[in-house]
Image (cartoon, grey):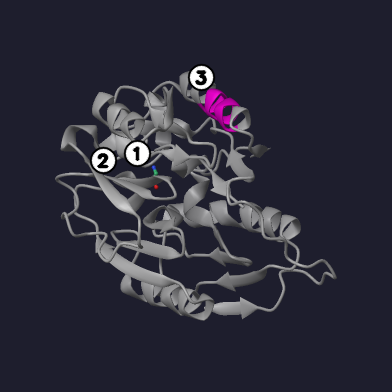
């Protein structure tokens, strides 16, 4: 991993922000029907529908109090709407992984440039091949991180992430992602600061052990796996994809305010809610 002291010369100190204050999203490109699709869908067909669902997604983030920046689509990269994979912001560091699928690597430069300009004073950590990693394989709950070992994220990528987290004093556990799932975030998420939501049939019941104190795992039935990708906010609001009644009732049972979104045409390109944002 290449470490750069500061992303740009700046006298500004790095400000610790609530992790959900600001988000970068990217428009759905006209080439979206060529997006990679192997798990949840067989490929999107309706670009206008995808664009309108994405518009509603942005509005839902804004309604939750997030300051959202919408980056222009890049028609040369059909998957560009799924920005989560391209960069991860961790405690004053911008991690730029080498995206696991070669066709997606060209999505990264404008995202990196945006974050470098926004996060003056953050340190830049740039992975290099043979390390590979998609941001969609990382989840964080408090100071504990989980990384999926998947078709997109390899051992070398995990080792580089571990070095960064060791440096920051954060714990990392590795979870093997089964062949029938894309990313760790395809099958789990953190709807609140003390909950992990995960899908039966994809991960073993001890996948998240050892858990941070006070954190518990809610298990949804396998047929609601897509509903396990949620975006929780400190207010107790949580966005979930529409049509997952068990997930909804599990989260409401924890006192959370569930807001359902229809993102069916993003799902057709294997995209979930978290895939479309980088929180920074
Ligand atoms: N379509 C999203 C991905 O495969 O990365």
**Considering the numbered disc 1 on the image, is that residue within a helix, a strand or a loop?**
loop
Residue 155, compared with residue 191, is above or below; it is: below
Residue 78 in view, yes or no? no
Q: Earlier in the sequence, mark 3 or mark 1?
A: 3
Find numbered disc 2 in the image and state the secondary structure of the residue it sits on: loop
Q: Give the residue at mark 2.
A: 39
The answer to the question of whether label 2 and label 1 lie on touching residues, with beta carbons closer than 8 A, is yes
Q: Nearer the viewer, mark 3 or mark 1?
A: 1
- Name the chief secondary structure element in magenta: helix
The verdict on label 3 being within 8 Å of ligand 1 is no
Q: What separation in Å lies between label 2 and label 1 (alpha carbons)?
A: 6 Å
- Provide the residue designation for mark 3: 48
> Is residue 178 in view?
yes
Figure check: 115 above or below 82: below
Quadrant containing ligand 1: top left
Q: Tag 3: Cα neighbours inside 10 Å, few (<14), some, or many (≥20)?
A: few
Identify the residue shown where x is 53% and y is 75%. 168
The numbered mark, 3 or 2, whose residue comes first in the sequence reads: 2
User: Callout 2: few (<14), some (14-19), or many (20+) C-alpha neighbours within 10 Å?
Assistant: some
Label 3 sits on a secondary structure element that is helix
Segment colored magenta: 54-61
Q: Is the residue at mark 1 in contact range of ligand 1, meaning its CB lies under 8 Å from it?
A: yes
Q: Is 60 situated left or right of 228 in this image?
A: right
Residue 270 bears which disc, if any? 1
Give the mark nearer the N terminus: 2 vs 1: 2
> Would you say residue 114 sits in the magenta stretch?
no
Camera-nearest residue between 80 and 89:
89
Residue 152: x and y, percent? 34, 59
x and y, in percent, of residue 273 in the image: 44, 37
């Amino acid at each position: 991993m290449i470490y750069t002291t500061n992303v740009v010369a700046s006298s500004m100190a790095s400000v610790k922000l609530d992790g959900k204050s600001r988000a970068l999203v990217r428009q759905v490109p006209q080439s979206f029907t060529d997006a990679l699709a192997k798990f949840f869908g067989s490929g999107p067909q309706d670009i206008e529908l995808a664009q309108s669902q994405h518009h509603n997604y942005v509005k839902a983030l804004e309604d939750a109090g997030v300051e959202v920046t919408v980056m222009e689509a890049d028609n040369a990269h059909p998957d560009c709407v799924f920005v989560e994979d391209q960069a991860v912001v961790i405690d004053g560091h911008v991690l730029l992984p080498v995206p696991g699928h070669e066709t997606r690597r060209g999505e990264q430069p404008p995202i990196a440039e945006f974050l470098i300009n926004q996060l003056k004073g953050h340190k830049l950590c740039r992975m290099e091949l043979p390390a590979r990693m998609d941001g969609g394989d990382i989840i964080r709950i408090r100071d504990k991180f989980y990384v999926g070992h998947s078709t997109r994220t390899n051992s070398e990528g995990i080792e580089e992430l571990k070095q960064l987290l060791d440096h920051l004093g954060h714990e990392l556990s590795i979870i093997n992602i089964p062949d029938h799932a894309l990313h760790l975030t395809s099958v789990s998420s953190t709807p609140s600061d003390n909950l992990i939501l995960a899908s039966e049939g994809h991960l073993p019941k001890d996948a998240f052990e050892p858990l941070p104190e006070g954190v518990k795992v809610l298990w949804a039935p396998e047929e609601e796996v897509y509903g396990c990708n949620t975006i929780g906010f400190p207010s107790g609001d949580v966005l979930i994809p529409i049509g997952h009644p068990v997930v909804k009732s599990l989260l409401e049972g924890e006192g959370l305010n569930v807001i359902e979104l229809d993102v069916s045409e993003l799902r057709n390109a294997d995209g979930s809610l978290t895939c479309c944002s980088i929180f920074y």
